[in-house]
Amino acid sequence: MTTEIIDYKEWLRDNVTLENPFSASSLRVMMKNLLLGRNYRLLTEQNTRERLFTTYAWLLDIYDKAHSTYGSNWRSKLLDDLLQIENKTPDKRNLTLWLLGLTKKTCSNLDICPQDYVEFLKETIQYCDKLFKAIDKEEQIDDAWLLFMAGHATLNIRGSTKSTIGKKLEKSFAKTALTLLGFEHNKNFWSNIERDEEVEREADAEVASKRGRIRIEMGLISSGNQEVIEDKISRVGPLGIVICDKLGAKSRVYTTAEHGRVKLIQIRNNQPLVELYNYLISKVDIKMQEPPTTEQEIQRRLDALPDEFFVVPI
């Protein structure tokens, strides 16, 4: 049986808002939302949900074809078909694992290799059949197995992109913001700085000031991870800047920053570019550009930047 029910990639491209959330155009959209103080995660969540529902539809098609071809033995026969494919696409590799009720990370944790797949599936089917017979639900085995597959597809899809998107945005935010304020990269500001003999901690950016350099750290962290921001405050030193996504209502991070003479800028429900401008203008020698504040102006200024600002390797 062929698993090419539909062209999965083409289907995603036609039905998902951010088909490639790592593309320059997608990251530019999310950057605009950050600069406007909005919740960029709503965009990635929409993307994730669309990918999930499209994947569920694909799995239903796979099941319908496999069940009509092989009957009740569809799980073992489908695995046989998948194992015979020599050069599997990422989608086929994922489908193989989801059929087993696994993800790549779970396989690694359980030390399961491809040679174990057939026996692992056999044991799982035996356990499932025994359980559903004991609870008198044998007619629901296939439905439960589809939920089993969909659950692991959900783990796979939810875990694979969001953290990487956040890291890419962190690496490009400071560079983009400083450029919009009139700084020149590798002339009066530097980004993604490695640690060296002089400074033992890496930094997301440094800005040339009248008396040296001001360190900048990014933390697109939600309100439940305040300890990460605390650590970044200790990294930048006095007069440094920490830019974060959102702080909890009872957070003491502002107090920590004040004690360390660190400027803390929250993105959410704020104008982070304006706040960064106001903090730096008296500390640098260059003539800074006034920050764009309207959505139209921010969009225009972002569109004028090259794609390299948003395509950042991790």
Image (spheres, rainbow, N blue to C red):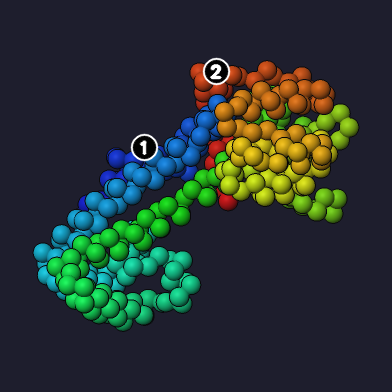
Residue 157: x and y in percent read 40, 53
Is 26 above or below relative to 60? above
Is 188 above or below relative to 1? above
Residue 137: x and y in percent read 18, 69
Of the pair 313 and 251, the residue shown nearer to us: 251
**Left or right relative to 4: residue 299:** right
Image-quadrant location for residue 130: bottom left
Q: CA distance from mark 2 to mark 1?
A: 24 Å
**Left or right relative to 84: residue 223:** right
Image-quadrant location for residue 117: bottom left
Taking the spot 29% from the left edge, 47% from the top edge, the residue there is 53
Q: Which mark is residue 17?
A: 1
Q: Amino acid at mark 1?
A: Thr
Residue 21: x and y in percent read 45, 42
Of the pair 62 and 3, the residue shown nearer to us: 62
Q: Which mark is residue 240?
A: none
Q: Residues within 10 Å of mark 1 (few under 14, many from 20)?
A: some
Q: Amino acid at mark 2?
A: Thr
Of the pair 294 and 22, the residue shown nearer to us: 294
Q: Which mark is residue 294?
A: 2
Asked if residue 272 shows in the view, the reply is yes
Q: Earlier in the sequence, mark 2 or mark 1?
A: 1
Asked if residue 191 shows in the view, the reply is no
Is 146 above or below relative to 46? below
Residue 108: x and y in percent read 47, 72
Taking the spot 42% from the left edge, 52% from the top edge, the residue there is 158
Label 1 sits on a secondary structure element that is loop
Taking the spot 36% from the left edge, 45% from the top edge, the residue there is 49
